[in-house]
Amino acid sequence: MKFGNFLFPQSSGPSDDYRAVTEALNESILSEQLGYDEVWLGEHHLDGACAYVDPIAFAGTVVGHTTKIGIGFSAVQMALHHPTRLAEQISLLDNLSKGRITLGIGRGTAFNFYEYRAYGIPFKQAQDRLLESEEILTSSWTNKTTYRHKGKHFNLEMPQLRPAVYTKPHPPLIRALATEETLLEMARLGRPFMMVVQSDEETIRLFHKYQEMMRISGHEENLIKKNLAKTRIWRNIVVAESDEEAAERALPAFEEYTQHIRDVRENLNTPEELESVRGNLDNPRFTSRHNIIYGSPSTVSKRISQLSNAGVGGLILHFRVGTLSQKHNEESLRLFSSEVIPTFRNTS
């Protein structure tokens, strides 16, 4: 199992942005020093939920400050990016990092309509833009002659992309998903996936469904094994010396984190937009019971073991939850590195 630190720093307001951004950069450097396999970068706009906002630009800085840790995107909101521009940017990062980039892409947030309005992109176009962009990305990276694409949203003609990708045939491209329907589609296509936060029970059920559908679709066991190793799931996490101490740190920080998200959605979405997704926002997966792992190294290891046994290939772990202090965040990162990761390394 691979372990990645999800750098998703919250900023309480404009005056807090510099602190949040620079501390996230320092956390990427510390993650490499502590032996994490990957750092993952997210994307949200205008609300302070992800202070650095632009994961592509931020990744360039992380590349320049690290030498070996993998750098993934969890995930680029594809509806807000032009696929040709993104293909060039990822190719450049792939070269600068000597192949350390994994591009995770998704349709984009299902709840923050204000992001689409700021970019002038209708929300109803997001899914079609994602599917069309996937085709353009892979084709532009691998095509050696002029590539032409005529679709619903993009009409393109381009010669061979420069710079050419460092990773052959191209950097790993993985779809972020939140629904069983999309997970089964990835299984039928023989592709790995990244999954948003779900309950452990639901995650395990979906991983079994994924393997079952891959077999029904005629994929060989070797490919199933390879795909499972590439899968990633997101969890919020706080580790401390005892379960009690972890709870004292994690639960208030998580509540503030979720309250911040609720507040900006109430303030920046229109009442009609918010009402259209109200039922989904009440999903139990957003509660602390399912959304955050917290406890001593022993408690955390037991919970992760269930996910490892289900076939999960790697965890995208958000350590800096909400208002958790930098001090407690670093303690959590160090404890997980020294006492949790070795448990899984020694049994792999």
Image (cartoon, grey):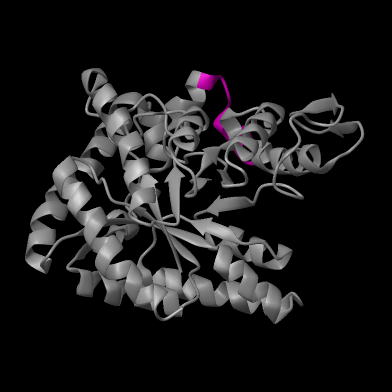
Residue 123 lies in the magenta stretch: yes
Relative vertical location of residue 166 with respect to residue 188 in this rendering, above or below:
above
Asked whether 188 or 27 is in front, the reply is 27
Relative vertical location of residue 70 with respect to residue 141 in this rendering, above or below:
below
Relative vertical location of residue 173 with respect to residue 42 in this rendering, above or below:
below
Residue sitting at 74 percent across and 79 percent down?
Answer: 220
> Percent x, y for residue 283?
34, 56
> Percent x, y for residue 49?
32, 34
Query: What span is in magenta?
Result: 119-127
Asked whether 327 or 191 is in front, the reply is 327
Q: How many marks?
A: 0
Residue sitting at 80 percent across and 41 percent down?
Answer: 139
> Percent x, y for residue 264?
29, 30
Residue sitting at 8 percent across and 56 percent down?
Answer: 248
Q: Quadrant of residue 112?
A: top left
> Percent x, y for residue 52?
38, 29
Q: Is residue 252 left or right of residue 46?
A: left
Residue 291 lies in the magenta stretch: no
The prevailing secondary structure element of the residues shown in magenta is: helix
Residue sitting at 38 percent across and 38 percent down?
Answer: 275
